[in-house]
Amino acid sequence: MPRLMFVSLRARVVTAAVALVLAIMLMPAVSVSAHEERVVATNYSFVVGFINEPAVQNDTNGLSLAITRAGAPVLAASDTLKAQVIFADQTRDLTLQPAFGEAGVYESVFIPTQPGDYTFRIYGQLEGVAVDESFTSSPEGFDSVRVRSDLEFPIVANGDQQETDPVTLAFPVIAGGAVLALAGGAVALRRRSGRV
């Protein structure tokens, strides 16, 4: 009977450790939510949205553009395509740069200072084909910029909000929990194995 309990405890520790590792691995995937995908010039797929979603007022963010043709990434598109960001009656030109380590993905960083709907215009030439497409944030597309104060927590004594990053706070808690669970499991296994 003690041998059976030892095996059962080890299985539970291993299962808990695997679940924690999977949760940590999936955290970045959850942060990238809605992007709008559209077929452009019959041959290309554009996926457009903010680099970080949900997009939050006064946080560093920007345009994310992924381009594929027949499932393959389109390279060097930033040489012939231009971009703009539009908010209400204001327009700003954006410089597209290849995203590090992501073939066919292009970015342009800016800080959205107002909450609400933004439009990204992509125009120019793509492998000799004229392109002029606009993507506007919507429930069916990519996220609108959210009001910063709606997401800030906790409120500090002077009435201002304390800036916090949930992912930054959650990661040490999860990692610490994983270490404690593994350490506790190892101690329990040593005690059990000493009794068998």
Image: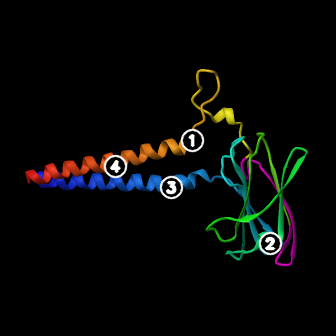
Name the foreground residue: 109 vs 73: 109
Residue at image coords 68%, 44%: 59
What is the span of residues highlighted in magenta in the rendered image?
Answer: 124-143
Residue 114 visible in the snapshot: yes
Spatial distance from mark 1 to mark 2, Cα to Cα? 35 Å
Residue 1 visible in the snapshot: no
Residue placed under numbered mark 3 in the picture: 26
Residue placed under numbered mark 1 in the picture: 165
Asked if the magenta segment contains residue 134, the reply would be yes
Residue placed under numbered mark 2 in the picture: 79
* 187 lies above or below 130: above
Q: Tell me which label, 1 or 4, sits earlier in the chain.
A: 1
> Percent from the top left, x then y, of residue 154?
57, 29
Residue at image coords 50%, 41%: 169
Q: Tell me which label, 3 or 1, sits earlier in the chain.
A: 3
Q: Nearer the viewer, mark 3 or mark 2?
A: 2
Q: How is the image coloured?
A: rainbow
Q: Determine the image quadrant of residue 103.
A: bottom right
